[in-house]
Amino acid sequence: MLWIVIRSPTGRWGVSAPTDDAVADGCEVYHIYASSEAEAKKKAQSIRSNHVRSGIPLPTQSAPYARTSTRQPVNVVDRQQRRCLFCGSDIPKTARSDAKFCCPAHRQLSHKQKRQGPQGSPLQLLLHQIEKVRNLERQLQIEVDQISDIMTKHQLWSDKTATQLLRDAGYGIYGEVASPLSPHGC
């Protein structure tokens, strides 16, 4: 039921009927859905306390506090449609709201698979390796672009100080840094 809760400038709380328009100036007005008058007062007092604590302007007769709808429970449909990321079965309704797996064993197995790397057919392994190479190509292109930006910024395409700038930026020059591909590490 809708209750109109009023707080007078003197601090007294009162409840009026929804059809009552005679509210004194300077009063705070709250439109509250509640099952009883006492519950409506408590809700209004709680809302006022939150407004004062948060620095939100208090409601007036010209702009009363009005909740347009009552609080709805958690959407049960979303909880029923949650699926385990490992096996695809339903996640139990009693699980936490942020659960991604139906049981601890599936969470552990999923983590173990991620640690061990991909497993499966040779085609899947080949596709995984191709993806790794593409990621390395992207990283290399980013590094090349950064080096080009440093060189362009300082206009040092042929100057020896360009080598020093690249070393300072964390880029090794070929022949000076150990390479994982070279047999002697130089």
Image (cartoon, rainbow, N blue to C red):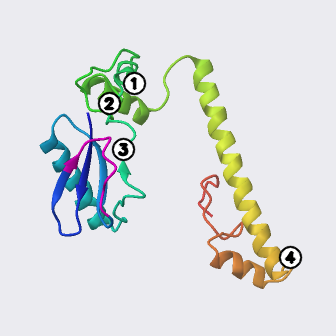
- Is 55 drawn above or below residue 129 in the view shown? below
- Mark sitting earlier along the chain (3/4): 3
Q: Does dot 2 land on a helix, a strand or a loop? A: loop
User: What residue did someone put label 3 on?
Assistant: 67
Tell me how far mark 3 sits from mark 2, CA to CA.
Answer: 18 Å
User: What residue did someone put label 4 on?
Assistant: 157
Tell me how far mark 1 sits from mark 4, CA to CA.
Answer: 59 Å
**In front: label 3 or label 4:** 3
Check disc 2: other Cα within 10 Å, few if <14, some if 14-19, many if 20+. few
* Image quarter of the N terminus: top left
- Badge 2 amino acid: Val
- Mark sitting earlier along the chain (1/3): 3
- Mark sitting earlier along the chain (1/4): 1
User: What residue did someone put label 1 on?
Assistant: 78
Q: Are marks 3 and 4 in contact (CB under 8 Å)?
A: no
Q: Is residue 36 magenta?
A: no
Position of 118 compared to 103: left or right?
Answer: right
User: What residue did someone put label 2 on?
Assistant: 74
- Badge 3 amino acid: Arg
- Is 138 drawn above or below residue 152 in the view shown? above
Magenta residue span: 15-24
